[in-house]
Image (cartoon, helix red, strand yellow):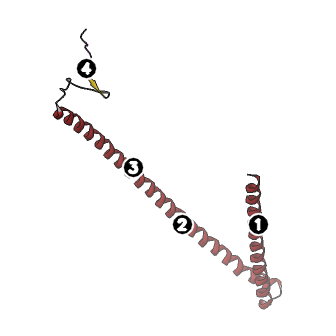
Amino acid sequence: MISTEQPRKNGVELDEAPEKDSGEEWFQLLSRHFAEITGHASRLAHLRAARFELKASQTITGVFLGLTLAVMTMVLGLAGVWLVFRGLPATLAQLLGGRVWLADLLSGLILVSGVVVLVLAVQKWSERRILRKLEEHDED
């Protein structure tokens, strides 16, 4: 019985059944497959490079926008603090009957106490966070 199927070698359909001594046909077949594989590898490398370039661009843009926002926030915050602490002594001076030195002293005390409270709050928050992490680690 004669088979009508195309001859196959290692899952590859052949146009004709190669002769046993036909190394040239095998070389052409391997060359064609090698060219396909290198073409796919080249496209894959280009896609990965493009993806890396896009991610790098997005990261740089995000960092730049974040830094810009942080600088703007600091400038506005410092301007607000400056205006408050410049107006506070003047207000206290009027309330204290024109005693500017006493108003400056009270303003300084208020500023220092605010910084101390802020430092203590951050320290307490940091301790709680560390304790929470230690408790989570002990549970594991």
Tell which circle, 3 or 1, labels the residue nearer the N-terminal end.
3
Q: Which residue is mark 3?
A: 48
State the separation of the CA atoms marked 4 and 3: 38 Å
Type of residue at label 4?
A: Gln
Type of residue at label 3?
A: Arg
Q: Which mark is residue 67?
A: 2
* Residue occupying image coordinates x 23% and y 26%: 14
Q: Which residue is mark 1?
A: 127
In terms of secondary structure, where does tag 2 sit? Answer: helix
In terms of secondary structure, where does tag 4 sit? Answer: loop
- Mark 4 vs mark 2: give the one in front: 4
* Residue occupying image coordinates x 25% and y 20%: 6
Q: Is residue 60 magenta?
A: no
Q: Which residue is mark 4?
A: 6
In which quadrant is the N terminus drawn?
A: top left
Q: Position of residue 10 (x, y in %)?
A: 31, 29
Q: Position of residue 24 (x, y in %)?
A: 16, 34
Tell which circle, 1 or 4, labels the residue nearer the N-terminal end.
4
26 w.r.t. 139: above or below = above
What range is drawn magenta here?
A: 3-7
Instruction: Residue lying at the far top in this picture: please name it.
Output: 1
Task: Determine the image quadrant of residue 66.
Answer: bottom right
* Residue in the foreground of this view, choosing between 58 and 77: 58
Type of residue at label 1?
A: Glu
In terms of secondary structure, where does tag 3 sit? Answer: helix
- Mark 2 vs mark 1: give the one in front: 1
Type of residue at label 2?
A: Leu
